[in-house]
Protein backbone atom coordinates (compact mmCIF):
# COMPACT_ATOMS: atom_id res chain seq x y z
CA UNK A 1 0.00 0.00 0.00
CA UNK A 2 1.00 3.60 -0.48
CA UNK A 3 1.74 4.02 3.24
CA UNK A 4 4.48 1.38 3.17
CA UNK A 5 5.88 1.96 -0.33
CA UNK A 6 9.05 3.73 -1.43
CA UNK A 7 10.11 5.31 -4.76
CA UNK A 8 9.79 4.56 -7.54
CA UNK A 9 6.72 2.41 -6.81
CA UNK A 10 5.37 4.99 -4.38
CA UNK A 11 5.00 7.52 -7.18
CA UNK A 12 2.79 5.22 -9.25
CA UNK A 13 0.49 4.56 -6.33
CA UNK A 14 0.30 8.16 -5.16
CA UNK A 15 -0.39 9.45 -8.69
CA UNK A 16 -3.50 7.28 -8.92
CA UNK A 17 -4.83 8.38 -5.55
CA UNK A 18 -3.73 12.01 -5.21
CA UNK A 19 -5.80 13.47 -8.02
CA UNK A 20 -9.05 12.44 -6.32
CA UNK A 21 -8.15 14.32 -3.15
CA UNK A 22 -6.77 17.64 -4.39
CA UNK A 23 -8.55 20.70 -2.90
CA UNK A 24 -10.33 21.48 -6.16
CA UNK A 25 -11.76 17.97 -6.36
CA UNK A 26 -12.66 17.93 -2.68
CA UNK A 27 -14.64 21.16 -3.05
CA UNK A 28 -16.97 19.29 -5.41
CA UNK A 29 -17.89 17.03 -2.49
CA UNK A 30 -19.29 19.82 -0.30
CA UNK A 31 -22.90 18.92 -1.12
CA UNK A 32 -22.33 15.22 -0.41
CA UNK A 33 -20.61 16.06 2.89
CA UNK A 34 -23.22 18.58 4.07
CA UNK A 35 -26.21 16.45 3.02
CA UNK A 36 -24.76 13.43 4.83
CA UNK A 37 -23.90 15.52 7.88
CA UNK A 38 -27.40 17.02 8.04
CA UNK A 39 -28.99 13.57 7.82
CA UNK A 40 -26.79 12.19 10.61
CA UNK A 41 -27.35 15.24 12.81
CA UNK A 42 -31.12 15.01 12.32
CA UNK A 43 -31.00 11.37 13.40
CA UNK A 44 -28.90 12.34 16.43
CA UNK A 45 -31.43 15.04 17.38
CA UNK A 46 -34.25 12.52 17.21
CA UNK A 47 -32.32 9.96 19.27
CA UNK A 48 -31.45 12.64 21.85
CA UNK A 49 -35.10 12.86 22.84
CA UNK A 50 -34.68 9.45 24.48
CA UNK A 51 -31.33 10.04 26.16
CA UNK A 52 -27.60 10.56 25.50
CA UNK A 53 -26.21 10.16 21.98
CA UNK A 54 -22.80 8.67 21.22
CA UNK A 55 -21.06 11.23 19.00
CA UNK A 56 -18.61 8.64 17.64
CA UNK A 57 -21.06 6.04 16.38
CA UNK A 58 -23.80 8.53 15.47
CA UNK A 59 -21.84 10.98 13.34
CA UNK A 60 -18.02 10.86 13.57
CA UNK A 61 -17.61 7.42 11.96
CA UNK A 62 -20.58 7.33 9.53
CA UNK A 63 -19.79 10.64 7.79
CA UNK A 64 -16.25 9.91 6.52
CA UNK A 65 -17.14 6.26 5.94
CA UNK A 66 -19.99 7.11 3.55
CA UNK A 67 -17.98 9.81 1.75
CA UNK A 68 -14.95 7.59 1.04
CA UNK A 69 -17.24 4.68 0.14
CA UNK A 70 -18.98 6.89 -2.42
CA UNK A 71 -15.62 7.88 -3.90
CA UNK A 72 -14.41 4.29 -4.12
CA UNK A 73 -17.71 2.89 -5.37
CA UNK A 74 -18.65 0.64 -2.43
CA UNK A 75 -22.37 -0.28 -2.32
CA UNK A 76 -24.19 1.40 0.57
CA UNK A 77 -25.42 -1.91 2.00
CA UNK A 78 -21.83 -3.13 2.51
CA UNK A 79 -20.27 -0.08 4.15
CA UNK A 80 -20.86 -0.65 7.85
CA UNK A 81 -19.69 -4.26 7.86
CA UNK A 82 -16.66 -3.36 5.72
CA UNK A 83 -15.72 -0.71 8.27
CA UNK A 84 -16.04 -3.32 11.01
CA UNK A 85 -13.64 -5.66 9.22
CA UNK A 86 -11.17 -2.82 8.69
CA UNK A 87 -11.36 -1.85 12.35
CA UNK A 88 -10.23 -5.37 13.28
CA UNK A 89 -7.14 -4.84 11.14
CA UNK A 90 -6.38 -1.50 12.76
CA UNK A 91 -6.71 -2.89 16.28
CA UNK A 92 -4.11 -5.64 15.69
CA UNK A 93 -1.34 -3.44 17.07
CA UNK A 94 -0.46 -5.21 20.34
CA UNK A 95 0.13 -8.53 18.55
CA UNK A 96 -1.78 -10.72 20.97
CA UNK A 97 -2.88 -14.11 19.67
CA UNK A 98 -6.53 -13.01 19.81
CA UNK A 99 -5.86 -9.80 17.87
CA UNK A 100 -3.88 -11.56 15.16
CA UNK A 101 -6.58 -14.21 14.79
CA UNK A 102 -9.33 -11.58 14.43
CA UNK A 103 -7.24 -9.48 12.04
CA UNK A 104 -6.29 -12.47 9.88
CA UNK A 105 -9.91 -13.53 9.56
CA UNK A 106 -10.93 -9.98 8.68
CA UNK A 107 -8.12 -9.65 6.13
CA UNK A 108 -9.23 -12.80 4.29
CA UNK A 109 -12.83 -11.55 4.16
CA UNK A 110 -11.76 -8.06 3.01
CA UNK A 111 -9.55 -9.39 0.21
CA UNK A 112 -12.36 -11.60 -1.08
CA UNK A 113 -14.83 -8.70 -0.87
CA UNK A 114 -12.65 -6.34 -2.92
CA UNK A 115 -11.83 -9.05 -5.47
CA UNK A 116 -15.57 -9.53 -5.92
CA UNK A 117 -16.07 -5.75 -6.14
CA UNK A 118 -13.36 -5.29 -8.76
CA UNK A 119 -14.56 -8.36 -10.63
CA UNK A 120 -18.06 -6.93 -11.07
CA UNK A 121 -19.96 -9.23 -8.71
CA UNK A 122 -21.88 -6.25 -7.27
CA UNK A 123 -22.24 -4.48 -10.60
CA UNK A 124 -19.90 -2.56 -12.84
CA UNK A 125 -17.06 -1.07 -10.72
CA UNK A 126 -17.23 2.70 -10.40
CA UNK A 127 -15.36 5.56 -8.79
CA UNK A 128 -11.77 5.20 -7.68
CA UNK A 129 -11.96 1.40 -7.73
CA UNK A 130 -12.79 1.45 -11.44
CA UNK A 131 -10.09 4.07 -12.09
CA UNK A 132 -7.43 1.87 -10.50
CA UNK A 133 -8.45 -1.10 -12.63
CA UNK A 134 -8.63 0.96 -15.85
CA UNK A 135 -5.20 2.49 -15.24
CA UNK A 136 -3.64 -0.97 -15.11
CA UNK A 137 -0.45 0.22 -13.40
CA UNK A 138 -1.13 -1.60 -10.12
CA UNK A 139 -1.35 -5.34 -9.57
CA UNK A 140 -4.58 -6.72 -8.14
CA UNK A 141 -2.93 -7.12 -4.73
CA UNK A 142 -1.68 -3.51 -4.81
CA UNK A 143 -5.11 -2.25 -5.85
CA UNK A 144 -6.85 -4.10 -3.02
CA UNK A 145 -4.23 -3.06 -0.45
CA UNK A 146 -4.63 0.61 -1.37
CA UNK A 147 -8.43 0.47 -1.38
CA UNK A 148 -8.34 -1.05 2.11
CA UNK A 149 -5.86 1.62 3.21
CA UNK A 150 -8.13 4.38 1.88
CA UNK A 151 -11.13 3.04 3.78
CA UNK A 152 -9.09 2.82 6.99
CA UNK A 153 -7.30 6.17 6.66
CA UNK A 154 -10.28 8.18 5.43
CA UNK A 155 -12.72 6.71 7.97
CA UNK A 156 -10.84 6.16 11.22
CA UNK A 157 -8.24 8.94 11.04
CA UNK A 158 -10.93 11.53 10.36
CA UNK A 159 -13.37 10.13 12.89
CA UNK A 160 -10.64 9.99 15.54
CA UNK A 161 -9.88 13.66 15.01
CA UNK A 162 -13.55 14.64 15.03
CA UNK A 163 -14.12 12.72 18.26
CA UNK A 164 -11.15 14.45 19.92
CA UNK A 165 -12.41 17.79 18.62
CA UNK A 166 -15.89 17.08 19.99
CA UNK A 167 -14.53 16.48 23.48
CA UNK A 168 -12.35 19.58 23.18
CA UNK A 169 -15.41 21.64 22.17
CA UNK A 170 -17.25 20.42 25.27
CA UNK A 171 -14.41 21.75 27.42
CA UNK A 172 -13.16 24.88 25.63
CA UNK A 173 -15.47 27.87 25.24
CA UNK A 174 -13.29 29.55 22.60
CA UNK A 175 -13.38 26.49 20.36
CA UNK A 176 -17.14 26.16 20.80
CA UNK A 177 -17.61 29.80 19.87
CA UNK A 178 -15.43 29.38 16.78
CA UNK A 179 -17.47 26.39 15.60
CA UNK A 180 -20.69 28.38 15.98
CA UNK A 181 -19.34 31.50 14.27
CA UNK A 182 -18.70 30.18 10.75
CA UNK A 183 -20.10 27.68 8.28
CA UNK A 184 -16.60 26.38 7.63
CA UNK A 185 -14.31 27.21 10.58
CA UNK A 186 -11.09 25.90 9.04
CA UNK A 187 -8.69 27.98 11.16
CA UNK A 188 -10.30 26.68 14.35
CA UNK A 189 -10.22 23.11 13.05
CA UNK A 190 -6.55 23.49 12.05
CA UNK A 191 -5.67 24.61 15.57
CA UNK A 192 -7.68 21.83 17.18
CA UNK A 193 -5.90 19.41 14.85
CA UNK A 194 -2.55 20.72 16.09
CA UNK A 195 -3.57 20.18 19.70
CA UNK A 196 -5.25 16.81 19.12
CA UNK A 197 -3.71 15.01 16.12
CA UNK A 198 -5.42 11.71 15.23
CA UNK A 199 -2.07 9.94 14.79
CA UNK A 200 0.03 10.44 17.89
CA UNK A 201 3.14 8.55 16.76
CA UNK A 202 4.85 7.89 13.43
CA UNK A 203 7.42 5.22 12.67
CA UNK A 204 10.14 5.53 10.05
CA UNK A 205 13.33 3.71 9.10
CA UNK A 206 16.49 5.74 8.53
CA UNK A 207 17.43 5.46 4.84
CA UNK A 208 21.03 6.34 5.66
CA UNK A 209 23.18 7.31 8.62
CA UNK A 210 21.92 10.61 10.06
CA UNK A 211 23.80 12.73 12.58
CA UNK A 212 21.76 14.87 14.98
CA UNK A 213 23.97 16.75 17.40
CA UNK A 214 26.37 14.24 18.89
CA UNK A 215 24.18 11.26 18.08
CA UNK A 216 24.30 9.16 14.90
CA UNK A 217 21.13 7.33 13.87
CA UNK A 218 22.38 4.36 11.83
CA UNK A 219 20.92 3.33 8.49
CA UNK A 220 17.97 1.01 8.95
CA UNK A 221 17.23 2.11 12.51
CA UNK A 222 13.58 2.33 13.48
CA UNK A 223 12.67 5.85 14.58
CA UNK A 224 9.56 6.82 16.52
CA UNK A 225 8.28 10.38 16.18
CA UNK A 226 5.97 11.80 18.86
CA UNK A 227 3.53 13.99 16.91
CA UNK A 228 1.72 15.28 20.00
CA UNK A 229 4.93 16.63 21.53
CA UNK A 230 6.14 18.02 18.20
CA UNK A 231 2.87 19.91 17.74
CA UNK A 232 3.29 21.48 21.19
CA UNK A 233 6.98 22.29 20.87
CA UNK A 234 7.49 25.64 22.61
CA UNK A 235 10.47 26.43 20.39
CA UNK A 236 8.16 26.28 17.36
CA UNK A 237 4.74 27.38 18.65
CA UNK A 238 4.31 30.30 21.03
CA UNK A 239 2.07 29.35 23.96
CA UNK A 240 1.84 25.83 22.53
CA UNK A 241 -0.95 24.61 24.84
CA UNK A 242 -3.22 27.53 24.02
CA UNK A 243 -6.01 27.36 21.42
CA UNK A 244 -5.08 30.14 19.01
CA UNK A 245 -6.75 29.79 15.58
CA UNK A 246 -4.91 31.40 12.70
CA UNK A 247 -1.61 31.34 14.58
CA UNK A 248 1.35 32.32 12.38
CA UNK A 249 4.44 30.23 11.79
CA UNK A 250 5.16 26.69 10.82
CA UNK A 251 2.52 24.08 10.18
CA UNK A 252 2.07 21.26 12.69
CA UNK A 253 2.88 17.65 11.80
CA UNK A 254 -0.68 16.36 12.14
CA UNK A 255 -0.78 15.24 8.50
CA UNK A 256 2.79 13.97 8.48
CA UNK A 257 5.69 15.35 6.47
CA UNK A 258 7.52 14.80 3.20
CA UNK A 259 7.01 11.83 0.91
CA UNK A 260 4.20 10.33 2.98
CA UNK A 261 2.31 13.54 3.73
CA UNK A 262 -1.36 12.60 4.00
CA UNK A 263 -2.89 12.46 0.51
CA UNK A 264 -6.38 13.03 1.91
CA UNK A 265 -5.66 16.05 4.08
CA UNK A 266 -8.05 18.34 2.19
CA UNK A 267 -10.93 15.87 2.46
CA UNK A 268 -10.39 15.29 6.17
CA UNK A 269 -10.31 19.03 6.89
CA UNK A 270 -13.43 19.65 4.82
CA UNK A 271 -15.39 16.89 6.55
CA UNK A 272 -14.33 18.00 10.03
CA UNK A 273 -14.97 21.70 9.38
CA UNK A 274 -18.41 21.20 7.87
CA UNK A 275 -19.65 18.55 10.29
CA UNK A 276 -18.40 20.13 13.52
CA UNK A 277 -19.81 23.53 12.60
CA UNK A 278 -23.20 22.14 11.63
CA UNK A 279 -23.36 19.95 14.73
CA UNK A 280 -22.56 22.73 17.19
CA UNK A 281 -24.83 25.18 15.38
CA UNK A 282 -27.75 22.71 15.45
CA UNK A 283 -27.93 22.43 19.24
CA UNK A 284 -28.10 25.16 21.89
CA UNK A 285 -26.52 22.98 24.56
CA UNK A 286 -24.09 20.10 24.09
CA UNK A 287 -22.72 18.50 27.25
CA UNK A 288 -20.88 15.33 28.16
CA UNK A 289 -23.33 12.75 29.48
CA UNK A 290 -20.62 10.50 30.88
CA UNK A 291 -16.94 9.74 30.64
CA UNK A 292 -15.61 9.45 27.06
CA UNK A 293 -13.95 6.12 26.30
CA UNK A 294 -10.52 6.65 24.70
CA UNK A 295 -9.01 4.23 22.23
CA UNK A 296 -6.36 1.96 23.73
CA UNK A 297 -4.03 2.13 20.75
CA UNK A 298 -0.29 2.90 20.43
CA UNK A 299 -0.70 5.15 17.37
CA UNK A 300 -4.30 6.36 17.19
CA UNK A 301 -5.51 9.27 19.32
CA UNK A 302 -9.28 9.21 19.46
CA UNK A 303 -12.31 7.83 21.26
CA UNK A 304 -14.46 4.74 21.10
CA UNK A 305 -17.40 6.60 22.61
CA UNK A 306 -18.36 10.13 23.61
CA UNK A 307 -21.85 10.24 25.19
CA UNK A 308 -23.52 13.63 24.77
CA UNK A 309 -26.67 15.30 26.01
CA UNK A 310 -28.09 17.39 23.16
CA UNK A 311 -30.61 20.18 23.64
Image: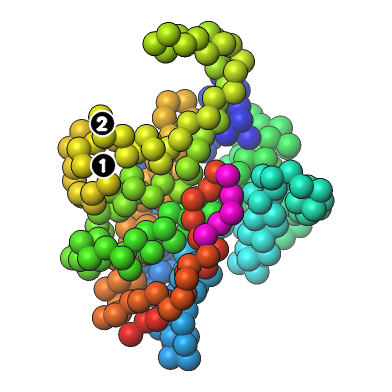
The residue shown at (63%, 66%) is: 80
Q: Do the residues labelled 2 and 1 touch (CB within 8 Å)?
A: yes
Q: Distance between the residues labelled 2 and 1?
A: 8 Å
Q: In which quarter of the image is residue 75?
A: bottom right
Identify the secondary structure beneath mark 2: loop
Q: Quadrant of residue 34?
A: bottom left
The residue shown at (52%, 13%) is: 217
Task: From the top left corner, tell me how far across and down residue 25 is, in percent.
Answer: 38, 46
State the residue lying farthest toward the front: 214
Does the magenta portion include 273?
A: no
- How dense is the environment of label 1, judged by Cα within 10 Å: few (below 14), some, or many (20 and up)? some
Left or right, 176 with respect to 308, comes to left
Residue closer to the observer: 301 or 117: 301
The vertical placement of 252 against 310, above or below, is above
Residue closer to the observer: 259 or 36: 259
Name the dominant secondary structure of the magenta segment. loop
The span picked out in magenta is: 294-298
Does residue 134 appear anywhere in the picture? Answer: no
Left or right, 296 with respect to 278, comes to right
- Res 240 label: 1
- Res 76 label: none
The residue shown at (48%, 31%) is: 225
**Image mark count:** 2
Quadrant of the image for the N terminus?
A: top right
Task: From the top left corner, tell me how far across and down residue 144 is, in percent.
Answer: 69, 42
Amino acid sequence: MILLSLPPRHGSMRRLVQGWFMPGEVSKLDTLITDTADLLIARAAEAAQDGPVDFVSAVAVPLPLHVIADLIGIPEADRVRLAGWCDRLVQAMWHSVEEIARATGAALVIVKYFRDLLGGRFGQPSGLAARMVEDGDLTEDETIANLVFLVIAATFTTSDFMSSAARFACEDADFRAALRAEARPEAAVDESLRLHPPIKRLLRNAAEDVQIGDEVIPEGALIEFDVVKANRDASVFEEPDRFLPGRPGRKPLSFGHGLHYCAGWALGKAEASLLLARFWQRFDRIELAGDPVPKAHPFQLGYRSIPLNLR
